[in-house]
């Protein structure tokens, strides 16, 4: 937020005297600010969601915050931190994605005709005009496979992650959202790898097979991905 404020202040300072100069400065610094939001979103979101995780594996009946083992879960400090984290969730993973969605919808016709909205190009350039909004879908995919899992019980996380991964595997395979056919192939390979990895972990949890067998399957998967990546 401080960085965004500095960008806005610098943009205000650099505003030119003519309307064209002001428009160019606004667009350039709007792009910089939005790109900054986009870059900090993954790491910030991971840090925020880690503050909801408690570690119960101490055999004492007391749980401690995974992000800071000096904080006991259920304490006053922990409750204050949870409230702060909830506000941060609304600002970052929710707020930034809502803002991106609004901006993309507002400039929909310019984006689809590729005749404007250059300050948003990092959000839609990789996708075909029909799927100009797909970066928001991809953000939802990443959130569902990482941060959102902290809100379900530990025993159910891998199962839910497997279902999410399978859902997005089918969604990406059906939509083929990227403008470049090779990007679609690479993304589909990555989604297939993620899905199979979660299914292997699920099989390990269920003791469905010997660890050695699952290890061989994982190694075969890793080798099988190489030709797909090279081919793209």
Image (tube, rainbow, N blue to C red):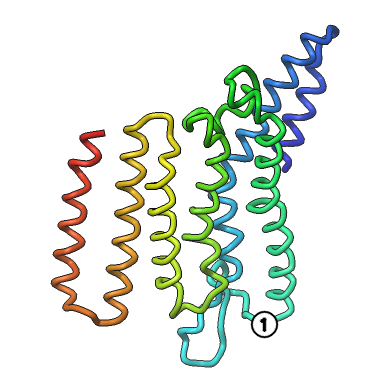
Q: Where on the picture, by quarter, is residue 209?
A: bottom left
Give the side of residue 36 with respect to residue 147, left or right: right
Q: Is residue 30 above or below residue 172?
A: above
Q: Residue 97, position in %: x, y?
A: 64, 46
Residue drawn at x 47%, y 77% is: 154
Q: What residue does disc 1 label? A: 74
Image quarter of the N terminus: top right
Residue drawn at x 59%, y 74% is: 70
Give the side of residue 56 with respect to residue 91, left or right: left
Residue drawn at x 74%, y 71% is: 80
- Please state which of residues 135 and 33 is positioned toward the viewer in this rendering: 135
Q: Residue 11, position in %: x, y?
A: 76, 23
Residue drawn at x 71%, y 56% is: 90
Q: Residue 115, position in %: x, y?
A: 61, 17
Determine the residue located farthest toward the right in the rendered image.
17
Give the SS element for disc 1.
loop
Mark 1 Cα within 10 Å, few/some/many (few <14, many 20+)?
some
Give the side of residue 169 with respect to residue 203, left or right: right
- Please state which of residues 38 and 4 is positioned toward the viewer in this rendering: 38
Q: Residue 106, position in %: x, y?
A: 72, 33
Q: Where on the picture, by quarter, is residue 228?
A: top left
Q: Count how many numbered circles sit on residues in the image.
A: 1
Image quarter of the C terminus: top left
Q: Is residue 219 above or below residue 72?
A: above
Q: Is residue 54 above or below residue 134?
A: below
Determine the residue located farthest toward the bottom in the rendered image.
60
């Amino acid at each position: 937020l401080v960085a965004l404020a500095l960008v806005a202040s610098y943009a205000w300072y650099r505003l030119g005297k003519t309307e064209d100069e002001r428009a160019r400065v606004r667009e350039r610094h709007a792009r910089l600010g939005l790109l900054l939001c986009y870059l900090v979103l993954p790491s910030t979101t991971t840090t925020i969601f880690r503050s909801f995780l408690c570690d119960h594996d101490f055999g004492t009946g007391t749980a401690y915050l995974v992000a800071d083992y000096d904080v006991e879960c259920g304490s006053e400090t922990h409750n204050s931190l949870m409230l702060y984290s909830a506000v941060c969730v609304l600002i970052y993973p929710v707020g930034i994605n809502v803002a991106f969605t609004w901006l993309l919808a507002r400039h929909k016709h310019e984006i689809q005709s590729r005749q404007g909205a250059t300050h948003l190009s990092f959000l839609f350039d990789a996708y075909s005009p029909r799927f100009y909004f797909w970066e928001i879908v991809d953000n939802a995919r990443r959130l569902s496979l990482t941060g959102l899992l902290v809100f379900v019980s530990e025993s159910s996380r891998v199962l839910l992650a497997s279902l999410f991964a399978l859902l997005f595997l089918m969604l990406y395979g059906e939509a083929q959202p990227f403008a470049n056919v090779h990007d679609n192939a690479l993304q589909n390979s990555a989604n297939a790898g993620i899905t199979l990895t979660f299914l292997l972990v699920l099989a390990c949890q269920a003791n469905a097979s010997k660890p050695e067998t699952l290890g061989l399957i994982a190694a075969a998967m890793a080798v099988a991905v190489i030709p797909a990546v090279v081919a793209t």
